[in-house]
Amino acid sequence: MGSSARAVVVTGCGVLAPLGVGVPVFWEALVAGRSAVAPIARFPAHDLAPRNACEVQAALPPDPDRAGAFALRAADEALADAGLAAPCRTRTGVVLGTTLGGMEIFERWDAARAAGAAAPPDVDRIPYFAPAVRLARTLGCRGPVATTQLACASGTHAVALAADWVRRGEADVVLAGGTDLLCRFVVTGFNALRATAERARPFDRDRRGLVLGEGAAVVVVEAAAHAAARGARVRARLLGAGAAGDAVHMTAPDREGGGAARAIAAALAEAGVPPAAVGFVSAHGTGTVYNDAMEAAALARVFGARRVPVNSIKGAIGHTLGAAGAFEVVACVQTLATGVIPPTAGLAHLDPACEALDVVAGEARRVPVAVTVSTSSGFAGTNAALVLGAP
Amino acid sequence: MTLAITGAGRVVPPAGAAPAWPQGVATVPEPVRARAARAERTTQLVLPAAAAALGAAGLLATQGAPRPRMGLVLGTAFGCFLTNAAYARRLVAAGPAAASPRLFAATVSNAAAGELAIAYRLGGPSITVSAGGASGLVALAHAADVLAAGRADAVLAGGTDAAGEPLAAWLADADLAADARHAEAAAVVVLEPLDAAAARRATVLGTLEGTGVGFEPAPRDAGAGEGLAAAVARACAAAGIAARDAALVVAAAPPPLAPLERRVLGDAVRTLRPKEALGETFGAAGVLGLLAALDALAAGARALVLDVCPSGHVAAAVVGAGARP
């Protein structure tokens, strides 16, 4: 991407996070090491175990389409941040990742059917592509619109797909990110897989599992020339993207980190950036035993003996699934801008198996960073990585 | 960047037929049959289609290390909808204690991509996209991105969607069936750079010469057409042709959206409507349309293939005739 004649940049960011609404609040909480993990309060959880999660606490207008509403709110902030009050409708696209879409609406629709009642009014907002369609309709987009389906790597690849569209000339501006919501469907599923815990402790020797989260993160991906022509402030450059399938197992990660390493290496190669130039890695870091060990192996494959600074924001906001990679992109943009790497909330004792990693913990680290990597992995053995550079 | 289509496979169960599984097991390579038999429906549809495509391209493997330069881009409108429904109903009926980890693990729309990667040793990019009825052509367009960026040497690309209840009932309630007969199918092709195909003397079944992706916020409105027109223009510009130069147009709009398509295309010289026979297959539709065009094109001719969905997703592709197998 970086060497292309049509370079691609990020010009705006927006989040609706468990830690608060808006990038400044989100970032301040991340840097302070705060965690949003708390007992589930929005829906019945008495029969769930574990029953902690990271819920969006902000009072939002009632909206049956929670994932879509999250995305709209994050997109509003991203557009304002980019100074794009009215993006050109024919040259603007949308790509969002999600793993749940309108699942709560599905449950209401199915219950209504069983009872012989009328379908709920938002019945068309059930499928995975619904949040992207809602945002695209709101903006009046005529450019490309799609939904990435890479499970927990969906948000990461949404930004990569947006960059590809911009580079190919499909659009000048693409709203890219991810959105997901908490509901009984997803909490019971991860609990049944025994992948969850009451506390998220990424890379900790005592980690027991992930804590689920919800929210949306959206960035404005834009052709560098388009941004320059309108005098926009460039937040970061999108230098490279990579993706790879493990081809090993449907739910367990490749113990050797093969797929994740291939995705990271491919993104670096596309960026034309040697591993030695990477100043910070925003890891997937779910806090499950196998993911974090896999990631340590993958990063060792790519970075060798060099201990590159790493963190995971999942101890702070939980695993937001289809939005997770998009939140990481926003965090990377902030690190590039501020030279601050937030600590990994929940990490007290680094797992000896992860000792090859320089995991930032305890308090934020101040260090100038010119290039960051964000990496995500998901069910079905999918992996995606992005390389971002300072403006 | 013009790409070679060096393999193709489609699974199109006859209208009204009972699910073709487990009979379909016989059409996948033996080492994959056990996985196929227990997989969810979209995976069962696409596994034999992919075996045919990879086999035709001379790139089929079921053993050995994952091949890092072999990529995969699948499109699906509804992906795991049926699995989600089964999981959710069981949860509602019997509570969290009855939640099925096996079912939940398949409640991701990239389940089919994951199974394909494992079955056929694809270790490159593994990507699934959803864009309603335009998912198949959006997947082909993104596969072209993957190849143009050099992230893979060859990409298995296409789409799949399953049919059945409660998906059919939901399509009716959401008004997405749009008067069309809903059918399940899978269709995939193998794409690779022309020079790479020539270097390994692969048979070129056709060429993918340009793609465009767009959106129609209100596709049934009388003024709609701007998004589709822009997508067609981008596909044609990439192919270096004018839309009127296409020898053939593969139309895709369901009846309520036919005016939209007519406004964009005008009076096309020759139009194929494969959905009249195949039904609305959503994620598979665009690639089935592309393959119908390749079947019908004369040597040296090009076709304009469309995907149009009531969701608003639209896409276009320009394909060229290849060698007759």
Image (tube, helix red, strand yellow):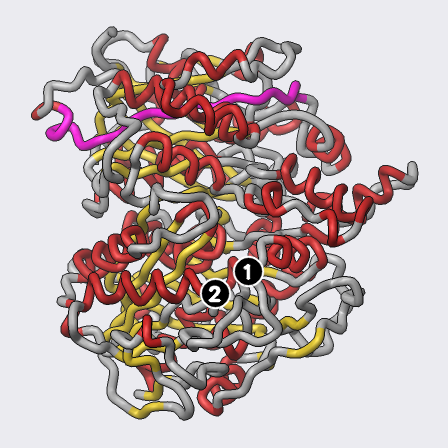
Q: Residue at x 67, y 51 (%)?
A: A102
**Place of residue A225 in the rendered image (x, y in percent of width and height, measured from the top left):** 26, 64
Q: Residue at x 56, y 28 (%)?
A: B41
Q: Give the alpha-carbon distance from disc 2 to disc 1, as whole Å.
A: 6 Å
Q: Read off the residue under disc 1.
A: A195
**Place of residue B201 in the rendered image (x, y in percent of width and height, measured from the top left):** 11, 19
**Place of residue A130 in the rendered image (x, y in percent of width and height, measured from the top left):** 61, 49
Mark earlier in primary sequence (2, 1): 1
Which one is in front, A154 or B173? A154
Which residues, given as a range, are shown in magenta? Answer: B180-197
Q: In the visual, does B309 lie left or right of A248?
A: right
Q: In the visual, does A310 lie left or right of B107?
A: left
- Considering only vertical position in the picture, is A69 above or below B19? below
Which one is in front, B62 or B192? B62
Residue type highlighted by circle 2 = Thr
Q: Residue furthest right?
A: A116
Secondary structure at numbered mark 2: loop
